[in-house]
Amino acid sequence: MNFTRENSRKENWEGKMMRKALVVGIDNYPTDKLNCCVNDANEVAKLLEFNEDEKRNFSIKLLTDANATKRKIKKALEIIYSDDTDVGLFYFSGHGFKDDCDGKIVTVDFNEDDYGISLVDIINIVKKSKCKNKIVILDCCFSGKMGEVFLMGEESILPKNTTILTACREQEVAIEVNGHGIFTNLLINALEGGACDISGNITPGSIYSFIDSSLGAFDQRPLFKTNVSEFVSLRKSKEKMSDTEIRKLAKLFLKEEMKYQLDSSFEPTNYPGSKEIGEKDLQEPYFKETNGLIFSLLQKGVSNGLVKPTTEKHMFYAAMKSDTCELTGLGKHYRYMVEHEKI
């Protein structure tokens, strides 16, 4: 990382930014050293700092190894959650410690009398925060304790607009493999676009779903707790369909149960002299460019799970046999969003 960018990071961190993130990774503990946590932190910081289109996303404070002391982490936590920014995010990769009272994230300067920062302390900082959205992501052993300490009896007291995502449950350990923690490797894949929706938004909910579905039955299990009215996007990936395309697609279907009528004039390979279709298989009416534009949009809807042929397996045959296509359940959802001016 060059000198200019480091300065930029520091100035933005201290200033009034709309989205702030503290990213911590520790490998070089005095004992029980780890191998992947600094890699994890560097990669997560890089992905959060900019969206895929290279527009700035989060202002990042990155603390690794010798800089990840208890004092520095606590001070940085208080800064990211100190004002009314849109999003305050804390990510930690390192050792976790479980005692009789609560769990702790282990700081680089731990000792037998003080292993680091308790999850209760982190919770109290989050609870006092005026941030519009508070997010905590922990990749360490026993990190699921973070979710449990929000429980009072059987009632959740998770603060409003707070989301917690942890690598494993309270009794589990977090595993390292191939240069990253298993959890953070999947988190990175999710932030790179694996968990994005059609519009390219990557939310805590979609990240959890992506990670949870990627783990086997005997792997560590992530924990997800949230108390929000709507999910905030953590990163913007390349959109699969633009809002304009989604609106145009939705308007083709006057009602959600409508079946859109096709014919052979929609299929771009159906024209006299076509090399793709033999002469005997050509159908009238032949391809029309205006219908071809509609068909291209419908095909894009099919590839993104919004549209499906009604009876045929492929849209080519639906067009050539003058069949119909219709919205899927997801397509109906997006049509609803357009109809109610949410897209």
Image (spheres, rainbow, N blue to C red):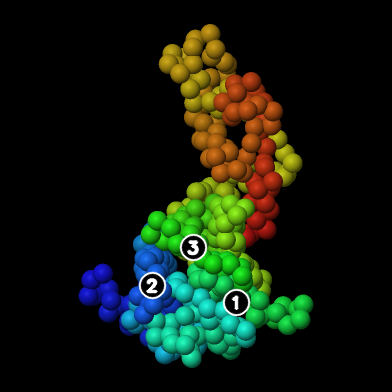
Query: Which of the marked residues, 3 or 1, is nearer the chain's N terminus?
Result: 1
* Residue type, numbered disc 2: Lys
Q: Residues within 10 Å of mark 1 (few under 14, many from 20)?
A: many
In front: label 3 or label 1: 3
* Residue type, numbered disc 3: Ile
Q: Residues within 10 Å of mark 3 (few under 14, many from 20)?
A: some
Q: Looking at this view, is 292 or 100 the one in front?
A: 100
State the mark number for residue 146.
1
Q: Looking at this view, is 39 or 169 the one in front?
A: 169
* Residue type, numbered disc 1: Met
Which residue does the image show at 55% across and 87% down from the upper left?
Answer: 121
In front: label 1 or label 2: 2
Which residue does the image show at 76% across and 78% down from the upper left?
Answer: 155
Q: Can residue 137 be spotted in the picture? A: no
What whole-number distance in Å separates the C-alpha atoms at marks 3 and 2?
A: 14 Å
The residue tagged 3 is 175
Q: Secondary structure at mark 2?
A: loop
Q: Position of residue 79 (x, y in %)?
A: 45, 87
Above or below for 172 versus 146: above
The residue tagged 2 is 33
Q: Of all residues shown, which one is farthest toward the left? A: 3
